Amino acid sequence: MARPIFSRVVNVSERTIAKVEADSQTATKLQRPYNEVYRLLEALDDVIDANSLGSWFQSPNEAFEGLKPLEVIERGEIDRLWTMVFELQSGMPG
C-alpha cells in the first residue's frame, strides 16, 4: 500500500511512517494499526483482486453510501469493511 494511503488508514503522518521505516526501533508505535490494516488487506485479498485494492480504497462505493472505503476507515467505521468481507466470503447478499 502506498505511503499516502497507509498514513490515512493508520491515522499518522507520512513523515511518521518515513521515520519508522528509517528506524525500526520506533516501529512499535505503529505495530497495532499496522497489524489491523495488514489483517484487513489479507481478508480483502480473498475477495478483491490484490492489484485493484489501491484504486478500490479510493473509489466511491455504493455499499458505503457513496463513501470511499478509505473514508469509511477514516471515520472510524472499519467494521463496515469487515462486514463486507464476511458477507462476500460467506456468499450472503449485501
Image: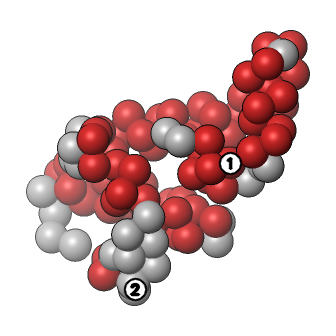
85 to the left or right of 94: right
Question: 7 left or right of 90?
Answer: right
Circle 2 sits on which residue?
65
Dot 1 falls on a residue whose secondary structure is helix
Q: Amino acid at mark 2?
A: Glu
Task: Give the residue displayed 73% in from the left and 53% down from the top.
Answer: 11
Q: Name the quarter where the C terminus is drawn.
A: bottom left
Residue annotated with mark 1: 7
Label 1 sits on what residue type? Ser
Q: Is residue 17 above or below residue 57?
A: above
Colour scheme: secondary structure
What residue is drawn where x is 40% and y is 86%? 65
Residue 59 in the image, given as x and y percentages of width and height: 38, 69
**Vertical order, 92 against 94 (above or below):** above
Quadrant for residue 87, please give it. Answer: bottom left
Q: Is residue 66 above or below residue 38?
A: below
Quick one: label 1 or label 2, which is nearer the N terminus? 1
Q: Relative to 72, is 68 on the left or the right?
A: left
Residue 6 vs residue 51: left or right? right
Residue 71 % position (x, y): 55, 70
